[in-house]
Each structure stands twice: as structure tokens, then as C-alpha cells.
């Protein structure tokens, strides 16, 4: 029997009369878990191209029948996935009773119900999926309590004391980001897909020297100094580009702000820590440019299988001066830049890289140069962003985005290098960024949902 609420019927009508968007799949089982209820979720890929490890985000208000759940009563299943066989005794001895048992009619996949506003109720269901060009694909959330399904993490986020100051970290398997400076991003890249930021902050290891412990850990590939680094924000006040780190009170010689009461200050928190996405929130407060006063909140997200991070920006305090203000976001032009692509709302910059800490004035960390390290910035097509190059402070590729009444904007950052397992050339990196921009502007969407009860 199928139960369809009035709200869900709207989704079915949009999908086609009779609910034709839905596949007719057999019911999933796992060992002695034989569920009797499920919610079908149809995800649409509107692009005429395949997508791999595509982030899927579904809000709680889009799944009202799952609004009041206990986390262990949901099992997300890909009906087209390869069912797992019964685990071996050796695997069960290692993993214990929470290891998945033999499956039928699909494969359970990892997911997360994320509480982003900290009220104890989930806000978004998140998972990743491979989608074919133009595909409408059905997944199922099966209802019923069961305690199986280890979910190894493919992303990580943390706030750590790193070289005597507080630093946020967030990473996927291939790339990681950190805020040595509180507003402008450092990038580190790995030679093998792995998570290693915990090694950096727990051992307080130099990002340029960490390869000496394990070459697979990779290295820092972004010199920031006084630039936007791998990504940073500011505001345009008239023709003047103002940034939180360089207020009138800042310690400009050392590239940091002054005191926490007399100058811009920051706070950091981890919102989500894996397995498939990890998020940190950065609050910038008491920012006085000399013309205007601002407070800004940024949420950065790392995604499993991706070389990009996204940022959601909100200004809870927006008091520009007489000249008015617009949003700004930028990345540093790679020193020695020999590859650049700028088109519309996307810019890619790449160059050979010498892996040496810029603070290493004694030149003790000499390493062989790598063929390229690349950085990219994407702003949404509908943001109205205007590209301009800003020569000051290291040379930066910047977008000026008209201020919105709600004080929000967003952007995507990406990174790659020749030493990684993927995107080993600037051209491959630029192609990845271009495809990621298309996905960013046309994310997979929830086309329809349906609640089923087993006959």
C-alpha cells in the first residue's frame, strides 16, 4: 500500500501523473533487518553530463515524513548498488556486531543527518552519488531500528591549537584547507587519498615538512603572506578594497590583527565532522575599516571525493560608510603564474611551486619544485559578480559582487597539484573546475518523494 500526503502529491504531479518518476524496486533486507516502511527519493540530474561523487542535499522540510526520527531508525539504500555478501568470521571478529550483514535488493550507503543550527533536530540529509547525464535516480530511506553500518570518514574538520594560535582545519581525501591567518586560506594537498589534518594539529607539524614523516601526507601548496591566499573575503568601499586582517588598527608588518578588543576578532567552531562532508564556521567581529563597520559569518564545507570547498557568507552586521559597499572574494595569483583561465564567474591560476615555508629565511627546507600547483575561484552565475585583478598585496584575482539586502553570498574554491592522484596537469585541473562550476550552478535536485508500506 502507498500512502501519499497532500504535500507529497505535489511532488508526484511534478514528476508525472501516477508517480512515474519512481522505480519499482524490491524491498531491501540486511541479515535479520526486514523493514516494512520506506521513503523513495528521486534525485534529478538536469545536466547533460555524468557527475561523480556528487553532493546531494535534502532539507528537512522536503522530507516531512522523516522530520521526527531517531538516527538509528534510518537506512539509506541505493537499489542499483551491489549487495554486500555475508561478512566473513574474520571481519566480524574485527568489526564486531555493528558490521553490516548480508544484503538483498540494493546496497546501504553512507549518509549524514546534519543539525546545522544546533537545536538538536536535523536540518539536512546529505549523501554523495554518481549520476548519469540527465538521470532521474531513486534512493530509499528504510525505516526501522538497526545498529549496523560502520561509516569510515572521507572528510574531517577540527579546531586546533597550531603553533600557539587557534586554527580551523577542514579536508577531503585529496585536498585540505586551514586558516593560519583567520581570513585567508592555506591549502595543503596529498599524494594519496587520505585524511591527515589531525596529524598536523595534534603533532604540530610544519605543513611544508610533513612529507618527511609520510610522503603521502603531501604538503602545503599555498603561500598566503598578505594576499587572499587560497581564498579570502573583503568589501569594496567605493574603489577601496578593505579586508578584515588589514584594518587601520592591524599589525600590518606581521600580517595579523592587533588586540581582540581593539581590532577585528574571530571565533571558530566545527559544525559537522564527516563522514561525507565536514563544516567549520568562522565568525569575524568588530571589523572597522575606517569607513564602515561589519560582522561576517562564513561556513566552509569539504566534500568527499572533491577537490573543492564551498563557502556560505552572511553579514549579520552591515554598516558601510558614505561610499557604500559591495562584497568581495578573491584568490592569490600564483607566484610565477604561467597558466591562467578567466571566464565569466570562474578563474583558475597555476604555476610551478617550490615547497618551502615562506617564513624559512634560513632556507633549510629546500625541496625539488613540483610541476604545478593550482587554485580556482567560482562565484555563482546569478551573483552578478564582476572580475577584476587587484595588484596590491601579492596580486589577487578578485570578484566584486553587488551587496544583497539579506547580506549573503557564496562561492567555491578548488585546488590541485601535479603530485596528487588526480588532476595532475593544469589543463586537467581547469577542466575539473569548469565542470564543478556547472554543477555548482545546477545542483542535483529533489524531484519527488513517496512513502511506501510493504504489502
Image: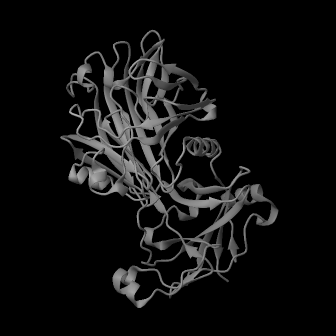
Q: Residue at x 45, y 79 (%)?
A: 146
From the viewer's perspective, tell me whether residue 204 is left or right of residue 106: left
The N terminus: image quadrant: bottom right
- Which residue, as the protein is rendered here, is positioned at the far front? 368
Residue situated furthest bottom in the rendering: 89
Residue in view at x 43 percent, y 60 percent: 154
Q: Quadrant of residue 258?
A: top left
Q: Is residue 3 above or below residue 63?
A: below
Q: Where does the image place residue 177, in percent across and percent down from the top left?
A: 39, 44
As rendered, which of 191 and 38 lies closer to the eye?
191
Give residue 206's quadrant in the image.
top left
Q: Residue furthest top?
A: 322
At x 40% / y 90%, what residue is drawn? 89
Q: Is residue 410 left or right of residue 451?
A: left
How many numbered badges does the structure rendering display?
A: 0
Pick whichever, 20 or 391, lies toward us: 391
What residue lies at 78% left-to-right and 65% top-to-bottom? 20
Q: Quadrant of the C terminus?
A: bottom right
Amino acid at each position: 500500500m502507498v500512502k501519499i500526503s497532500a504535500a507529497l502529491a505535489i511532488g508526484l504531479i511534478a514528476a508525472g501523473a501516477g508517480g512515474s518518476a519512481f522505480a519499482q524496486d524490491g524491498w531491501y533486507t540486511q541479515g535479520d533487518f526486514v523493514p516494512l516502511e520506506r521513503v523513495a527519493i528521486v534525485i534529478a540530474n538536469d545536466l547533460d553530463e555524468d557527475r561523480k561523487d556528487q553532493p546531494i542535499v535534502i532539507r528537512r522540510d522536503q522530507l516531512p515524513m522523516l522530520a521526527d526520527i531517531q538516527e538509528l531508525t534510518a537506512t539509506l539504500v541505493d537499489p542499483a548498488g551491489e549487495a554486500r555478501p555475508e561478512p566473513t568470521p574474520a571481519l566480524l571478529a574485527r568489526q564486531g556486531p555493528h558490521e553490516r550483514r548480508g544484503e538483498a535488493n540494493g546496497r546501504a550507503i553512507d549518509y549524514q543527518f546534519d543539525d546545522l543550527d544546533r537545536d538538536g533536530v536535523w536540518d539536512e540529509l546529505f549523501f554523495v552519488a554518481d549520476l548519469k547525464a540527465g538521470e532521474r535516480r531513486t534512493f530509499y530511506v528504510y525505516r526501522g531500528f538497526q545498529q549496523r553500518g560502520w561509516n569510515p570518514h572521507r572528510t574531517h574538520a577540527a579546531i586546533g591549537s597550531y603553533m600557539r594560535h587557534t586554527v580551523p582545519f577542514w579536508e577531503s581525501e585529496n585536498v585540505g584547507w586551514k586558516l593560519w591567518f583567520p581570513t585567508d586560506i592555506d591549502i595543503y594537498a596529498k599524494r594519496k587519498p587520505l585524511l591527515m589534518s589531525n596529524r598536523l594539529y595534534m603533532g604540530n607539524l610544519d605543513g611544508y615538512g610533513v612529507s618527511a614523516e609520510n610522503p603521502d601526507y603531501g604538503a602545503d601548496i599555498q603561500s598566503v603572506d598578505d594576499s587572499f591566499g587560497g581564498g579570502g573575503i573583503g568589501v569594496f568601499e567605493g574603489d577601496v578594497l578593505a579586508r578584515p586582517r588589514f584594518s587601520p588598527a592591524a599589525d600590518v608588518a606581521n600580517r595579523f590583527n592587533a588586540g581582540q578588543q581593539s581590532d577585528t576578532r574571530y571565533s571558530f567552531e566545527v559544525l559537522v565532522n564527516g563522514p561525507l562532508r565536514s563544516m567549520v564556521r568562522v565568525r569575524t567581529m568588530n571589523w572597522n575599516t575606517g569607513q564602515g563597520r561589519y560582522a561576517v559569518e562564513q561556513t566552509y564545507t569539504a566534500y568527499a571525493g572533491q577537490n573543492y570547498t564551498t563557502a556560505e557568507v552572511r553579514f549579520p552586521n552591515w554598516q558601510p560608510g558614505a561610499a557604500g559597499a559591495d562584497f568581495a572574494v578573491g584568490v592569490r595569483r600564483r607566484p610565477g603564474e604561467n597558466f591562467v583561465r578567466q571566464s565569466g564567474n570562474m578563474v583558475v591560476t597555476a604555476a610551478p611551486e617550490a615547497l618551502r615555508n615562506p617564513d624559512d629565511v634560513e632556507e633549510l627546507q629546500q625541496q625539488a619544485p613540483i610541476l604545478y600547483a593550482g587554485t580556482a575561484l567560482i562565484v555563482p552565475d546569478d551573483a552578478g559578480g564582476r572580475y577584476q585583478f587587484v595588484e596590491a598585496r601579492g596580486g589577487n584575482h578578485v570578484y566584486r559582487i553587488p551587496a544583497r539586502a539579506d547580506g549573503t553570498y557564496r562561492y567555491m574554491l578548488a585546488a590541485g597539484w601535479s603530485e596528487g592522484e588526480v588532476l595532475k596537469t593544469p589543463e586537467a585541473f581547469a577542466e575539473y573546475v569548469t565542470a564543478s562550476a556547472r554543477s555548482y550552478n545546477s545542483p542535483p535536485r529533489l524531484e519527488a518523494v513517496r512513502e511506501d508500506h510493504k504489502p
